[in-house]
Amino acid sequence: MSTEDKLSVLSVASPWGKQPKDISELKKQRGNLKGRLTQFKKYLDSLPCNSISQVQVKEVKFRMQAAQNHFNTFNNIQNQIELILPDSEYTANFEYVESFESLYFNVLATAESIVENTVESLKCNSKSSVQSNVKLPDIKLPSFDGSFDQWLEYRNSYITMIHNRSDLDEIQKFHYLKASLSGCALQVISALEFTASNYVHAWDLLHSRFHNTRLLIQNHLK
């Protein structure tokens, strides 16, 4: 098929509503699409990676839809280019397509990750807000001020009443733990941020500090 015949075929498939003049125009259109993806990437790079506003979430989603349309248009243009592409340009053409697809999938993955992180962050904030508004059940807690002779009794009571309970979550247990401590015992965990993930760490710190077998035996023998 001659170049003229190939171009007559392209006039039917052109996504731009007109017959391209030559391969240079098709490449220019293809380059414009890559430029739009690059602009989208720059926009994403300017956003915080962990959480964005709800307005920004909507904007990112709209831009993702536009990027998907650009990808479809790119494939249409690429099909037209390959009909009239000289054999000498096949390697360069393949590398360009690979570069475009790599940019496209990277941009979409980044955008989706930002949206997912924001949604997850909003869920966590909502859960924390609900938990903070829930009145904890009244429990007569054991108390511990750091005296070694009180540790075993406190430890056994606390484990039974709080630590091993399945109906309490980690943040609630951390609340009860702090409420049951005073003096140097409270100071052991005072530097820890009040989060669910830190509860086990706080309990381990107390256990490491006060569950000293040698000192416990000495106190028992006094």
Image (cartoon, rainbow, N blue to C red):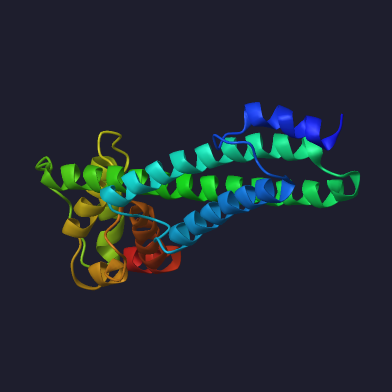
Spot the residue most to the right: 88
Q: Identify the residue at image location x=86%, y=33%.
A: 2
Residue under the point 55% across and 38% down = 16
Q: Which part of the image, by quadrant, shows the N terminus?
A: top right
**Percent coordinates x, y for residue 88 in the rendering:** 90, 49
Name the residue rendered at 35%, 66% in the picture. 221
20, 174: nearer the viewer: 20
Q: Would residue 170 be visible to someone looking at this image?
A: no
Residue 164 found in image quarter: top left
Comparing 76 with 130, the one in front is 76
Q: Nearer the viewer, residue 18 or 171?
A: 18
Q: Nearer the viewer, residue 67 or 219?
A: 67
Would residue 198 be visible to someone looking at this image? yes
Quarter residue 167 falls in: top left
Depicted 89 relative to depicted 218: above or below: above
Quick check: 41 left or right of 175? right
- Would residue 174 be found to the left or right of residue 139 on screen? right
In what quadrant of the picture does the C terminus appear? bottom left
- Could you tell me residue 184's position as x and y percent? 25, 73
Q: Position of residue 83 (x, y in %)?
A: 79, 34
Q: Residue at x 32, y 51 (%)?
A: 56
Looking at the rendered structure, the number of numbered marks drawn on it comes to 0
